[in-house]
Image (cartoon, rainbow, N blue to C red):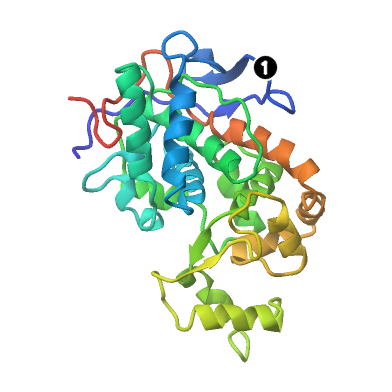
Amino acid sequence: MAAGIMSPARNCASMIGTAFLVVTILSVMAAGGVSALQTGFYATSCPNAEDTIYSTLQQLHANDADLPPVLLRLHFHDCFVRGCDGSVLLQGSGTERTAPPNARLEGFAAIDAAKAAVEKLCPGVVSCADILAFAARDSVKMVGGPGWAVPGGRRDGTVSLASEASSNLPGAQMDVNGLTSNFAKQGLTRDDMVILSGAHSIGEAACVHIDNRIYDYPSASGVDPLLPKDFAAKLKKKCSQRGLTNRKFDLDSGTSAVFDAQYYSNLAKRTGLLTSDQVLYEDARTRPLVLESTNKANFFPKFTQAMVKMSQISVLEGTQGQIRQRCGYVNK
């Protein structure tokens, strides 16, 4: 894909709704002043849009148990690069999809299917960026997590650069300082970072991302001494050599197919998978929120709030960007 014309500069700041997100209008700061995404944005222009997206994804999930974490991750990777503008979906040489941190992103076909379904209902109305935000919410809900009102009105960007993905996405070996700094660039707090990390309640990570914990840790054995011996043995059995990209291990040992609070309980038992997971418990600044979040009654409301906040990062609205006809391509 050609680089295209640069879209207008966008600022990043947002305000969250109430604990259960039942407000109708969520104000955000955008380039040029205060604007607003709205819950029920398509109530008039495409009233069945959200239901159609959910039913489409539900049908796909019936044949693909891995779809929910894939779509949740896709939304995250979209929002952390150029904001939540669907730029991660664009195909072509040098786009975000080609960046090393996005090498194993999946879920594009599911988003295309959801887009095709709503295009049949309301051609040219629902943006791919909004579909990604709805899909992230629907994915969590489909596997036992909370639902929430997703404000709509995002428009699709026309630029997608691999270099920006490589420089903006957090890494699996970051410590709390690195993670906090990375999230702060997106207008998110350290608490937001801890809560959004709970998305690792579902899904898997490639073995290569834990080489530093089971083979290359600076200890006599090469194993991170924080890892319980039996857990380290399980990891080495599955990830039997360095550099494996096609073999994966559950991010949440025990309940990886259910969105719950077990992820945080695992951290307290020191069975977090990635360095960037386990450091949340080891650091005194983030440990209290980790322990509080072991109770899903505490975790779920905070997660829904943080997801709405994240979904408003540097959005395009009004006449900015476009509504793509196909999510992988800028309109001609």
What x and y, as percent, mark residue 68? 50, 47
**Rendered residue at 60%/36% (across/down):** 307
User: In this rendering, does residue 322 appear at all?
Assistant: no
Tell me how many marks there are.
1
**Rendered residue at 67%/42% (across/down):** 192
- Judging depth in this view, the residue of 53 and 169 nearest the camera is 53
Hey, which quadrant is residue 100 in on the image?
Answer: bottom left
The quadrant of the rendering that contains the C terminus is top left
Q: Amino acid at mark 1?
A: Val
- Quick one: SS at disc 1? loop
What x and y, as percent, mark residue 262? 71, 57
- Judging depth in this view, the residue of 14 and 205 nearest the camera is 205
User: In this rendering, does residue 18 appear at all?
Assistant: yes
**Rendered residue at 38%/51% (across/down):** 106
Seen in the picture, residue 148 relative to 23 is either above or below; the reply is below
- Judging depth in this view, the residue of 67 and 33 nearest the camera is 67
What x and y, as percent, mark residue 58? 47, 39
What x and y, as percent, mark residue 212? 54, 75
Q: Is residue 233 left or right of residue 270?
A: left
Residue closest to the far top:
44
Hey, which quadrant is residue 92 in on the image?
Answer: top left
The quadrant of the rendering that contains the N terminus is top left
Seen in the picture, residue 60 relative to 128 is either above or below; the reply is below
Residue tagged 1: 23
Q: Is residue 226 left or right of residue 6?
A: right
Seen in the picture, residue 294 relative to 304 is either above or below; the reply is below
- Judging depth in this view, the residue of 284 and 204 nearest the camera is 204
